[in-house]
Amino acid sequence: DHFSQYGVVITDISVTNVHLPKEFADTMQEATVWHNRNEFKTLQQEYDLRKIEVREAEAKEKQKLKEDLEKFTAEKDKDVADWRKKKKLVDAETSKQLSVVKENETADVLEIKSNAELVVAKLDSERDVRLSKIRSTGTAESEKIKIETDTYLQTKRANAEAEIAKNKAQSLKLQADAEAFAAKQL
């Protein structure tokens, strides 16, 4: 079929050594080269298409990995922020509790101090009363009244100081509660 255009009909062929005219050989060779070139170009196009597909798939994968990394980073940043918030709440609660403990300690110390001063004042007055009885019997009555008056005044003063200490302690406690409330609001 291919050779019929040149006027050649082949029924049986056995080629041992062929010499073709230059023009005929070039034509045959050109057809073969064209066929091979066409096949090469087809393969080249397929290769180029696959190369583009691979690049696109690689770009998509890189973009997906980048998005996944950004999502992961955002989640971890949120976790860190949550933990910091929890830590601040714990710090605020701890500060509040420490403030309450310090205020209670101050109030207890003031109360113990005022009670001790009251006891000391009573003991001092009792001592003074006994000493005055022993010193003189003639002036004992006047001295006794004087000491009892002093005792009464010291007792009243000690009671007043104890009341002042209690009020100061209550004031400190209220201030600590207010600071704790304010810290909790933060």
Image (tube, grey):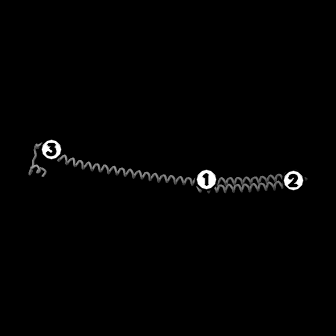
Q: Residue 152: x and y, percent?
A: 81, 56
Residue at the image position 65 percent from the left and 53 percent from the top: 102
In-image side of 147 versus 23 (left or right) = right
**Circle 2 sits in a helix, a strand or a loop, which is it?**
helix
Using a 10 Å C-alpha cutoff, classify the residue at mark 1 as few (fewer than 14 neighbours), some (14 to 19) or many (20 or more).
some
In-image side of 168 versus 36 (left or right) = right
Using a 10 Å C-alpha cutoff, classify the residue at mark 3 as few (fewer than 14 neighbours), some (14 to 19) or many (20 or more).
few
Q: Nearer the viewer, mark 1 or mark 2?
A: 1
User: Quadrant of the rendered structure where residue 19 is?
Assistant: top left
Disc sitting over residue 166 in the figure = none
* Image quarter (top left, top right, bottom left or bottom right) of the C terminus: bottom right
Q: Residue 173: x and y, percent?
A: 67, 56
Disc sitting over residue 26 in the figure = 3
Amino acid bearing label 2: Glu
Disc sitting over residue 143 in the figure = 2
Mark positioned earlier in the residue sequence (3 or 1): 3
Residue, disc 1: 95
Mark positioned earlier in the residue sequence (1 or 2): 1
Determine the CA span between mark 3 and mark 1: 100 Å
In-image side of 137 versus 185 (left or right) = right
Q: Nearer the viewer, residue 27 or 51?
A: 27
Determine the CA span between mark 3 and mark 2: 154 Å
Amino acid bearing label 3: Asp
Amino acid bearing label 1: Ser
Using a 10 Å C-alpha cutoff, classify the residue at mark 2 as few (fewer than 14 neighbours), some (14 to 19) or many (20 or more).
some
Mark positioned earlier in the residue sequence (3 or 2): 3
Do labels 3 and 1 touch, CB within 8 Å?
no
**Circle 3 sits in a helix, a strand or a loop, which is it?**
helix
